[in-house]
Image: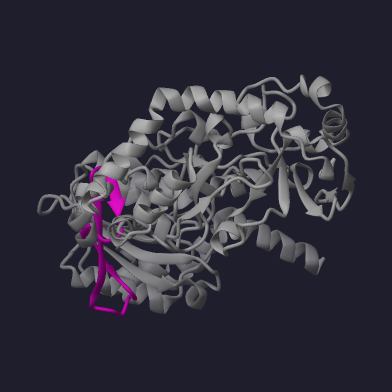
Amino acid sequence: MVIHMLHTRITKNREYGDFQTPSSLATQATQLVKSMGLRPKSIIEPTCGRGQFLLASIAGFPNAQSYVGVDINSEHLRELKNMILSHSYKSRIRLIQSNFFELQWSTLLNTLPEPILIIGNPPWVTNSVLSALGSKNIPEKSNFANRSGLEAITGKSNFDISEWMILKHFEWLRNRRGAIAMLCKNAVARKVLAHAWKEGLPIHDTRIYRIDAQKYFNVAVDACFFVSKFGFNGASKDCKVFNDVYDSSISDVIGYRDNTIVRDVNEYDKWSHLRGADYSYVWRSGIKHDNAKVMELISIGNKLLNGHENLVSVESSYLYPLLKSSDIANGRHTMPSRYLLVTQNSVGEDTTHIQYDAPKTWSYLKANAASFSKRGSSIYKKHSQFSIFGVGAYSFTPWKVAISALYKKLDFKPIGPMDERPVVFDDTICFLPCWSRQEAYFLVDILNSPPAKAFLNSMIFWADKRPITIDLLKRLNLYALSCELDKEKMYLNFTKRRGIQQFQNNTNQLCMNFRSSYARPRID
């Protein structure tokens, strides 16, 4: 019985993202808002829980005309009500039990005088976690961040509930005077800021105070206290960052430049002339297959083992040397120890011909068909049974310039053929396809230069799970970089020699050549 009750409590905490704010943190955060000169007439804590922010706001802003606390949890509200029964301000305090996603907020807000302070600690949980729990405490499904088609179905559509909520707060204050002051993940603060700046919302005096989430909530999350004013003195596209809620010194200034949120506006402004699209070189991600134990094979002597430690016998025609993020980041990229079964030359290609081209490979795939059917991502639906993504002519070029998306350093590596075959990567690696050793080493040289690193570093938030992305890398114009380094002639020599159309034709032919010409009987 005790175990069942504990499980129920943990599940409820996960469902509501229930991390109650310590009173000391709520008090200090409220004092920070007060120090910014805000004097609200109305204060709302939209997911108030036990009301630590509401109580701190009553103490910090005793002259406000209205205090409102809203929460779905009746137990929390009962506890909060007991705390305010003897309070001298109780006539100005209103508690509402309601689901955030069902309450008629516009009706409530229309009754409140400005300026309005929206303060609190929204749930630290994602929509995918709530869906897995079967929770009804979730917003109506929609592509609220306007993700593109592939992004919306490959993971970027998973979002923090607090992100959705804070964006709603922004809508509430779009044409009003007031402020938003929220505890949230750093990544959430940046996302809502980017949205506000992109939409031209009238925010200013925006600040991020980093907090020690391990200390306050016993969770390993990069979090902050995020504050932004609305509708007072125009708008600003910069945000001051402080290392702690008790710190008065600015550590960084993030901002919005060229439709991008950047980590260091001063450094970005210095190197922004390097920004631009480069149509000669297109950054790519490695192959996505979501079936590592079957598709990735380890070479031990003359034998191949899969992730289940089963001996595998397949033809070499669909096997390619594989490098992963850890290989690139840790310098293990000179000798292959893994191979990947690459079942397609391009996305959408039929895979049934493998049964005639490589009977042993087909038998192996069919024997493991169940594991392919279990792949969770919807991108595999309506595609061939053994389909993969992130594959194309670019996957088979002999040379590449690669960098790990996961590791916390800008370190580009030249990668050449291994066992007379082009190397392929997993989807945690970003790379440029190249045609020659000279081209790859030239690109590595300029990409590892101080100007390139300074420009890219100004936009990278290193605490992110995947700090280096295709979107980031493609902002760097390699031609502009080569001019900065006085290597323009070398750049033009390589791009003239390769030619975009010639590149497409050659790589298409290359795919077919590798399928038919290169045999490696030692691992058959």
**Which residue is at 37% across, 50% downward?**
191
**Which residue is at 73% across, 62% downward?**
7
Quadrant where the N terminus sits is bottom right
Query: Residue 92 location in percent, x, y?
Result: 30, 61
Vertical side of 242 occupied by 349: above or below = above
**What stretch of residues is rendered in magenta?**
238-265
Quadrant where the C terminus sits is top right
Image quarter of residue 360: top right
The one of 213 and 458 positioned closer to us in this rendering: 458
Q: Is residue 170 visible?
A: no
Tell me if residue 262 is in the magenta stretch: yes
Query: Residue 20 location in percent, x, y?
Result: 50, 68
Residue 479 located left or right of residue 273? right
Tell me if residue 92 is in the magenta stretch: no
**Which residue is at 62% across, 40% downward?**
288
The one of 118 and 418 positioned closer to us in this rendering: 418
Name, please, the residue furthest toward the left: 233
The one of 214 and 302 positioned closer to us in this rendering: 302
The one of 318 and 257 positioned closer to us in this rendering: 318
Question: For the image shown, how many numbered marks are present on the structure?
Answer: 0
Query: Residue 316 location in percent, x, y?
Result: 78, 37
Q: Is residue 199 visible?
A: yes
Vertical side of 8 occupied by 374: above or below = above
Q: How is the image coloured?
A: one colour
Residue 16 located left or right of residue 316? left
Query: Residue 207 location in percent, x, y?
Result: 26, 63
